[in-house]
Amino acid sequence: MKSLSFQKLLAELLGTFMLATVVLVSLTPSTPFPLATPIAAALSLGLSVYLLGSVSGCHINPAISLAMLVCRQMDIIHFVGYIIFQCAGALLAYFFSAFLYP
């Protein structure tokens, strides 16, 4: 079993933060063109995979982590750590976007 490194957890937090922030900011009422949200999300996800994929696998989504657990590609310790840091990244993105657009 591989050890769970803080680098992997931080990569998941940053990837989730980036994706959630881009989506939340693109959905604000002041955005003139909300149809660009899927494009912004795809670009953000692609950049995250490119930058962080070699570090943590770049799951970014708890559903992906759950699928990896079910397929036995990840153990329960990694799963719990990934879920905690993905939720923390999403919460940080929410608070950051609420700070930007009160």
Image (cartoon, rainbow, N blue to C red):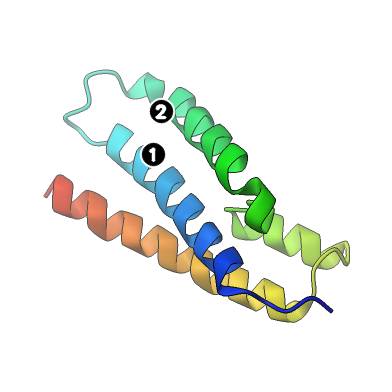
Viewer-side residue, 30 vs 83:
83
Q: Amino acid at mark 2?
A: Thr
* Label of residue 37 in the image: 2
Q: Which residue is mark 1?
A: 23
Q: Residue at x 43, y 28 (%)?
A: 40
Query: Dot 1 surroundings within 10 Å: few (below 14), some, or many (20 or more)?
Result: many
| 37 to 89, vertically: above or below | above
Question: Measured from the top left, where is residue 11 in percent x and y?
Answer: 53, 58
Q: For the view shown, which residue lies furthest in the right direction?
A: 72
Secondary structure at numbered mark 2: helix
Q: Is residue 44 left or right of residue 51?
A: left
Q: Residue at x 48, y 61 (%)?
A: 13
Q: Is residue 74 left or right of residue 20?
A: right
The quarter of the picture where the N terminus appears is bottom right
Q: Is residue 62 left or right of residue 96?
A: right
Q: Quadrant of residue 22?
A: top left
Viewer-side residue, 16 vs 35:
16
Q: How far apart in space, not on screen, are marks 1 and 2 (Cα)?
A: 6 Å
Count of all numbered marks drawn on residues in the image? 2
Residues marked 1 and 2 touching at CB (< 8 Å): yes
Question: Measured from the top left, where is residue 29 in percent x and y?
Answer: 20, 33
Q: Residue at x 25, y 60 (%)?
A: 95
Question: Measured from the top left, where is residue 65 in percent x and y?
Answer: 69, 61
Secondary structure at numbered mark 1: helix
Q: Residue at x 60, y 65 (%)?
A: 8
Q: Amino acid at mark 1?
A: Val
| 17 to 25, vertically: above or below | below
Question: Measured from the top left, where is residue 14 in percent x and y?
Answer: 45, 55
Query: Dot 2 surroundings within 10 Å: few (below 14), some, or many (20 or more)?
Result: some
